[in-house]
Image: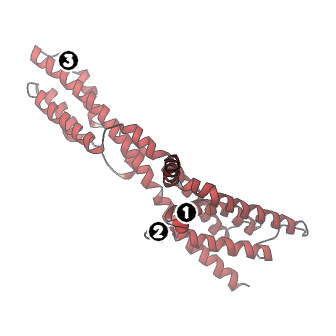
Amino acid sequence: MTHAGGHTERVKQRTHEGFLRHKHFMFAQIATALCVVAVGVYFFTAASLDEPPSGGSWIGYILGTISAGLIVWLACLGIRKRVITSGHYSLKAWVSAHVYLGLSLTVLATLHTGFQFGWNIHTLAYVLMMLVIVSGALGIWAYATLPQRLHGNRGETTRKQMLESIESLDRQMHDVAQPLDRAGAELARMSIEDTELGGGFWTRLTNGYGNCANRRAAARLRALPPASNPAQAEALTKLEQLMQQKAEVLALARRQMQITAFLEGWLFVHIPATFALLAALTAHIASVFAYW
C-alpha cells in the first residue's frame, strides 16, 4: 500500500511539473552545454587569429547554420501546439526546448556575428532575433506569474459575478435617484450610462481610466450643496455609498482585464517579430550565398 501511494505521488508530481522544470531542466542543461562548447571552440579559434572569427569563417558558418536551423525550428511551435502527443515529444517538452534553446541563440548568434555589426540586413536579422527572444522571455514571465496574480486579484469572485455586481449597483442607483432633483439624478445617470469598463486594448493594458465617469460623478456628488429635505439627503448619502462600492468593483474588474491584456498583448510583438525575423533571415542567407 505504501509503495502504491508513493508511486501515485510521483505520478502527480510529474503531471504538475512545469515546462521550465521539464525532465529536471533537461533542455536547460542541453542549451548550456551547447553554449559552453560554442564559446570554447570560438575563443580557441580566435586565439590563433589576429582578430575574432567573422561570420564568414568556418566557425562562423557552423554557428550560423546552427542558429538558422534553431530559429526555423523555434518558429514551428505554433504548428506543434495544434498536435497533441505525450511522452518524449509532448508539447511540454517542446515548449521547454523552445525556451532554453531559444535563449541559447543569444550566445550562438552573437558568436556567429563575430561581434561585427553595421547598417545592413545581417544586423537587422540579429536585432529582430533579440527582439523575439526578449519578447519571448517577457511572455515566460507573464505566464509564470500573472495567472497567480489573476487568482489573487479576484479571490473567489468570477468575471461574471463582477459584471453582475456592477449591474446590480446600477439598478440600485437608478432606484435611489428617484427622489433627487435634476442635478443629483444627472450624476446618477452619468455613473450608470457613461462609465466605461472595457475600452480599447491600450486602455485595458495601461488601466487608463483616469476620466472614469463614476469617479467624476462621485466627486461632483460630494460637491453638491446640502439637500433641502431629509428624503433627498438620505438618497444622496445612499447614492454616494453605491458609487463607492461600484468604484471598488470597477477597480477589481479593470485590474483583471489589465492582467489578461498583458497575457495577450506580448503576442502582438512576439509573433509579428518572428515573421519579420524569418524574412530578414532569408534575406541574410540569400545575400551570403549571392556574394559567396
Q: Nearer the viewer, residue 137 or 95?
A: 95
Asked whether residue 53 appears in the rendered view, the answer is yes
User: Percent x, y for residue 6?
Assistant: 53, 48
Distance (Cα) linking label 3 and label 1: 66 Å
Q: Quadrant of residue 256?
A: top left
Q: Please give the residue where the numbered disc 1 appears in the rendered image.
A: 93
Tags 3 and 1 touching, CB below 8 Å: no
**Earlier along the polypeptide chain: callout 3 or callout 1?**
1
Q: Nearer the viewer, residue 20 or 292?
A: 20
User: Percent x, y for residue 19?
Assistant: 54, 56
Badge 3: residue crowd in 10 Å (few <14, some 14–19, many ≥20): few
**Earlier along the polypeptide chain: callout 2 or callout 3?**
2
Q: Amino acid at mark 2?
A: Thr
**Earlier along the polypeptide chain: callout 2 or callout 1?**
2
Q: Looking at the image, is mark 2 or mark 3 nearer the viewer?
A: 2
Query: Dot 3: what SS?
Result: loop
